[in-house]
Image (tube, rainbow, N blue to C red):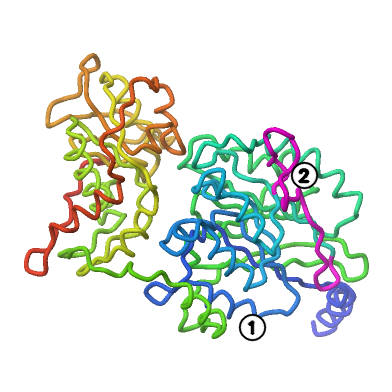
Amino acid sequence: MKKVVLLLTVMLLPFVLSAKDTVVYHTSDTHGFFYAKKGQGGFAALAAVVKNGPKNYLLLDSGDFSNGTVEAKNSKGLKSVQLMNALGYDAATIGNHEFDFKDPGVAPILANAKFAILAANFFEADTLKRPAHVLPYKMFNRNGVKFAVIGLANSNPTQATQKYTFTPQLRELENVLPEVEKQHPDVVVIIVHDSFADDKHGMQGQYVADIARQFPGRVHIVLGGHAHKVFQNQYLNGTLFVESGRYLKNVSKITVTTDDKTGKFVSAKSELIPLNINKTGQDKAILNLTESLREPGVDEVLGYTQEPMPKRADNPKFLDNSLDNWVADLGRQYAEVDVFINNTGGTRVDMPQGAVTRRDVIDIHPFENTVTKMTVDGRMLKRIVKSGLSKGRTRFAFSGLAVNFVYNKKGKVKDLHIWVHNQPLENRKKYTIATNSFIAEGRSEGFVFKSIPDQDKVRVGAKSIRQLIEDGLRQGTVKEPIKPGPVGRVAER
């Protein structure tokens, strides 16, 4: 037996000696979360991980780094870029939230990035050329391995653009890949701001898995985002798909194995590293930089809560949550409508217990969305409700409306029952509804609102959703804190 083991070891030894491992780190949807929260996350922890790891590595990001916290928002994304520069990011692609500051905000983000901005499908509308500081791909040599990194931007910006245009991602990949292959890379990596499996944004990201189907053996790794999901070691046709979650709570570490003699790709595997600062530590220089970037005047206490308002319900049969329901109640009161529809993706983090500051509110809802109302019949309202339901989650929270349903064996919604103010929904009856302006325009998970004519949509007042949240918080005091909104409005039977 010992002779057999020895023989196998000798036979495998040449392969082991000729194999080389190179590390690629990946983040996505960092959304300006510079600092650790509850002991996890932040750029200082990320810097500690990459600096204490292998010296020859790639650090890549799949977009949505420009907005999400007060520091990112007030600097129009430039503080995010400053930190990414300091960490030595190699490349990033363009997410939908890179457009949060409209067309004038895009060029400064691109110009200030010392890392490569890669977006093969992103062009100037008037010239049909790629904007300054944007490349379709870039070659990197790390650890003696030649990497080709191709970028694919998200083509559904949060703010409508007149200056820029997008082309289909797979079409541009088909155009660019032959040019890349002429340079004989050892490893081909794609960074894309869309998800391998997105149940949040309709059909937007369906093409991502098709990368492996349409280009088998030609793309080795796809690093995605946008849906705020985590995927590790997800393979399709030999291509590795990785997604790293959100808010810089984690970093993905992809170990790429190549043949040391030929340079050819052998395999890739990934692992998720939680950025728990008690384990990772925090890089002192980056920590000092993040602290210097803190925005003043945002730690004013606005009000008090009796207990946390989480974004997830404790009861597995309830898909709604107390925070989104509370925001929906504020919206319905403000708009004076039958039903208010609040997209659960618009509130980003939980409401803390006790004193709540303006910083907390901006973390919860960093956007400038106002309120839009419209009148629809019961059929349309049912379409809206159903469009928001997917297995185990709801894209919408409601005030003035309750719904229950069952799933069939395929995970599809059936036997849907809806009540408006405790009365069964009537198909032909007219209902006044309201939602935030982003959803009303048919953006992201609000895609069904595109079928409602724009002339039927009316802006309500001047207050943003965030201002409504601030006003609601001011009703809470130390002696009489705000209580969480009730749950059970969206229930699975």
User: Mark 2 or 1, which is nearer the eye?
Assistant: 1
Circle number at residue 174: none
Indicate which disc residue 52 carries.
1
Judged from the image, the secondary structure of the residue bearing numbered disc 1 is loop
Question: Distance between the Cα atoms at labels 2 and 1?
Answer: 35 Å
Pick out the residue farthest to the left.
Answer: 479
**461 part of magenta stretch:** no
- Residue type at numbered disc 2: Pro
Q: Name the residue: 60% across, 39% down.
A: 155
Q: From what the image shows, is residue 164 above or below residue 377?
A: below
Residue 84 rendering spot, x and y as whole percentages: 60, 67
**Quarter of the figure with the C terminus:** top left
Q: Earlier in the sequence, mark 2 or mark 1?
A: 1
Viewer-side residue, 329 vs 357 = 357
Residue 344 x %, y %? 35, 46
- Residue 112: x, y in percent? 64, 61
Give the side of residue 397 with respect to residue 447, left or right: left
- Amino acid tagged 1: Asn
- Residue at 49% x, 59% y: name it: 31
Residue lying at the far top of the rendered structure: 428
60 left or right, relative to 440: right
Are circles 2 and 1 on residues that touch, CB within 8 Å? no
Q: Quadrant of residue 307?
A: bottom left
Q: Position of residue 291 (x, y in %)?
A: 46, 78
Q: Please identify the quarter of the rendering in which residue 418 is found.
A: top left
Write down the residue under mark 2.
216
Asked whether, in this view, residue 264 is left or right of residue 201, the answer is: right
Residue at horizontal 45 percent and vertical 36 percent from the top: 443
User: Element at badge 2?
Assistant: loop
Which residue is at 37% across, 37% downward?
A: 437
Q: Which quarter of the figure is the N terminus placed in? A: bottom right
- Magenta stretch: give its range: 119-145
